[in-house]
Image: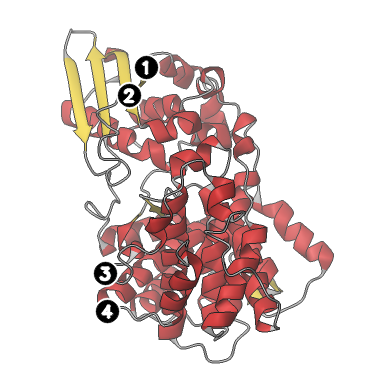
Amino acid sequence: MTPAYTKDLVEFLAALDVPPEVFNKARYFLLDYLGVAIRGSLAESSAPIYKMIERIGAGGSSTIIGSGVRTSAGYAALANGAAAHAIELDDTHNAGSIHLGVVMFSTALALAETIADVAPEQFFLAVIAGYEAAARIAMAVQPKEHYLLGFHPTATCGVFGAAVTASKLLDLSAEQMLSAVGIAGSMAAGSLEFLREGAWTKRLHPGLAAQNGIQAAMLAAEGFRGPSTILEGRDGFLAGYSRKPIPERITDGLGESFEIMRTSVKPHACCRYMQGPIDAILSLVNEHDIKPEQVVNLEVGVLEAGWTLVAEPRAQKYKPQSVVDAQFSMPFGAAIALLHRHAGLEEFTAENAQSNEVRRMMGRVTLLKDIRLDRNFPKEWNARVTILLNDGRQLEKFIQHPKGDPENPLSWEELVAKFKSLTSAVIPLDRCDQIVDHVSQGNPALLPAMCSR
């Protein structure tokens, strides 16, 4: 008899209780989310979403962050999730290779504005539960296998987490939450085809997951029934979305630790699989004061799970045509790290993607699959870089835990600095300080309105 993985997970999350350090970590990720959502509101891909919502005329009490426009919870979640994912600086759960905060906070903030007197504890418990559900489902489906079938875990697994977050904010029973999760299974979609031509659809994925999770929970609240075996069933999510699922990961060690504690923050504005190699390049460049003209060859080891995301097809990765292409090009990330000694939003631009200087440096970048890097993946996202200089020196750097990993985290002060660097282009500095104070005190009330121009 197949274990009732879906039911067991939902029953645990419905009665969830967590220690103080887990609440503290949720506040940490809330600040990171707000920073990327505010700055992402300026992204070129955000404007059409705002215009669509304006054209529809969907009124409501939920805020579109960065604009101040009010709309329904679902549309606000869609807009905020898409904006927050646009700049590729949102958090990542390592073992699930999934962006959690951009889904769960988009869900929680939009929905909480429609509910009177949501206590901070309820808000953060709902988010933590969503992180737990989506991360465990992503681990069970196995990211590498999921990618091979063309799926993006943030969208497909994220919708389950969003349904859990919304269910807890709506005070649904365990039985109702089980239906919400079952309904969400029919909303699990998110294609990687955007990689072929630098399209914007990946940016929609967390917003769609958040919007659909809210809808699934609201349907369940009204008595709509979903399948209780949506994860483990014969025609369920694991069977349909992975060739080699490991269903035990859904429930193994429930309550012993929490997946939000295993989630990373990004310092560089690009795909998670490029973060470690960029760390290694920056370390060597700064330690040895390497000038671009000294570099003969730069060899970058790429994790196998990320190979099809950042290394193939070769012609596209070595000649990115757009910002999206650049965000998923390891040769581009390596080149700008060497040339600019930084890999932020100012470097991941369309102008740099077309730059002859950057393309010449990309021509000196060699990518390879290094089996040594995969031995501890996904527990560790190792990176190894070797730079050959024109004086014959060969310099190598190994990174065990990229900056931002739980084992090598950004301090609160570093996270605040990241937040302010992102938001100062959108809102006044004194309001940035107010937002930091609200988050540090664990009070999510009024935050969406404060985060608007």
How far across and how far down the image is residue 451, in percent? Answer: 53, 70
Q: Provide the secondary structure element on which disc 3 rests.
A: loop
Spatial CA distance of label 2 from label 4 is 40 Å
Q: Earlier in the sequence, mark 4 or mark 1?
A: 4
Give the residue drawn at x 40%, y 84%: 121
What amino acid is at disc 4? Pro
* Residue closer to the observer: 23 or 372: 372
Q: Earlier in the sequence, mark 1 or mark 3?
A: 3
Nearest to N terminus: mark 4 or mark 3: 4
**Amino acid tagged 1:** Thr
Q: Is residue 281 visible?
A: yes
Total number of numbered discs in the rendering: 4
Task: Identify residue for label 3.
Answer: 256
Per the image, the residue denoted by label 2 is 300
Q: Does the image show residue 64?
A: no
Tell me where residue 390 appears, x and y as whole percent.
Answer: 23, 8
Q: Is the C-beta separation of discs 2 and 4 under 8 Å?
A: no
Q: Earlier in the sequence, mark 2 or mark 4?
A: 4
Q: Circle 4 sits on which residue?
A: 20
Q: Position of residue 54 (x, y in %)?
A: 78, 65
SS for dot 4: helix
Residue farthest along the bottom direction in this orientation: 117
* Residue receiving disc 1: 366
Q: Element at badge 1?
A: strand
